[in-house]
Image: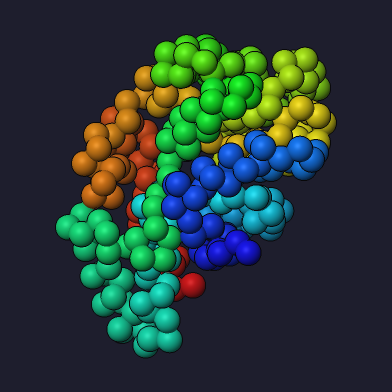
């Protein structure tokens, strides 16, 4: 039985990275035709799903839902400690639990044990694919970025088979052409980087049309990170829950999105 936690209506598996990868490995070993979908919601995605029933349903029917954001771990912790508390007490716990994160990153890891980013998940699955002789297809991101990502992944895992790469667009008019390409490539695993919610909707509409694809994952800006197009925050920023500050410094145009993840999301969780 899957152990899950709900944050503002979006479900997450409460498993470690190791357990998640064991699951993926199990799926790759399966001989049946069942297709598996992986989603990687972060606070921004949760907010998008709040006002979009269809999107939320698609996220919640995924076979694996991995938290790609410290905010998700915090919300799961806050929901537990503030259960059945009065509003003033809740507000106090809200401030304290948020303030603790940079000083004690382990504090928020009691409900969902680990954060697993899209890039780490992609790398780990590619390592598995290389071991198991499975082909991966990289779809999405700006022109040339998926190709560059493929090169970097090949360097990391020389045995990895890249079935193909394609930028394309999540536009429905582009779909048939893309599906034909992936079908021809005979890919086993498909990574889709069209951002949320386009990538999850794309997978939901199309996975059944690509017979060889066993696992599909929506992975957001992963190709930008893996290709080196956008630098990832240094390890300590990530560890102490400050990745948002680094991204704000590097990409100030993301301010609205960062505001949603770091201010709007925690407030919604408080008053849900
Ligand atoms: N993207 C794309 N086509 C689109 C919209 C987005 O290929 O029409 C790509 C974009 O280039 C980026 C990825 O989708 O590589 C996700 O972008 P975003 O910054 O939203 O990622 P997140 O913050 O969700 O990781």
Q: Is residue 48 left or right of residue 36?
A: left
**Residue 43 seen:** no
Residue 85 pos. (x, y %):
38, 86
Give residue 129's quadrant in the image: top right
- Residue at (43, 41) in percent of width and height: 117
The answer to whether residue 107 is above or below residue 238 is: below
Q: Which residue is at the front of the view, 129 or 230?
A: 129
- Residue at (63, 24) in percent of width and height: 134
Q: How many marks?
A: 0
Q: Is residue 203 left or right of residue 154?
A: right
Q: Is residue 178 left or right of residue 198?
A: right
Residue 72 pos. (x, y %):
43, 57
Give residue 156's quadrant in the image: top left
Image colouring? rainbow
- Residue at (76, 38) in percent of width and height: 31
**Residue 59 seen:** yes
The answer to whether residue 264 is above or below residue 149 is: below
Residue 257 pos. (x, y %):
42, 44
Which quarter of the figure is the N terminus placed in?
A: bottom right
Residue 139 pos. (x, y %):
61, 23
The answer to whether residue 249 is above or below residue 184 is: below
Q: Which residue is at the front of the view, 140 or 30?
A: 30
């Amino acid at each position: 039985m899957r152990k899950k936690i709900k944050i503002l209506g979006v479900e997450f598996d409460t498993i470690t990275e190791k357990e998640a990868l064991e699951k993926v490995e199990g799926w790759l070993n399966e001989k049946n035709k069942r297709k598996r979908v992986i989603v990687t919601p972060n606070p921004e995605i949760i907010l998008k799903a709040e006002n979009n029933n269809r999107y939320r349903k698609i996220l919640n029917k995924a076979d694996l839902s991995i938290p790609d954001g410290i905010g998700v771990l915090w919300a799961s912790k806050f929901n537990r400690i503030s259960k059945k508390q009065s509003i003033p007490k809740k507000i106090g716990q809200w401030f304290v639990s948020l303030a603790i994160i940079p000083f004690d990153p382990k504090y928020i890891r009691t409900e969902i044990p680990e954060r697993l980013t899209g890039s780490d998940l992609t790398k780990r699955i590619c390592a598995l694919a290389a071991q198991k002789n499975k082909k991966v297809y990289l779809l999405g991101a700006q022109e040339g970025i998926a190709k560059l990502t493929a090169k970097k992944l090949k360097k990391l895992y020389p045995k990895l088979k890249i079935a193909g790469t394609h930028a394309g667009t999540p536009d429905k008019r582009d779909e048939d052409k893309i599906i034909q390409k992936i079908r021809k490539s005979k890919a086993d695993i498909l990574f889709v980087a069209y951002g949320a919610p386009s990538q999850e909707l794309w997978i939901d509409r199309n996975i059944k049309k690509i017979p060889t694809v066993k696992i599909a994952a929506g992975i957001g800006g992963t190709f930008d990170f893996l290709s080196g197009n956008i630098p990832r925050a240094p390890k300590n920023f990530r560890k102490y829950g400050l990745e948002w500050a680094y991204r704000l410094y590097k990409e100030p145009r993301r301010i609205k999105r960062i505001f949603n993840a770091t201010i709007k999301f925690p407030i919604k969780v408080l008053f849900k």
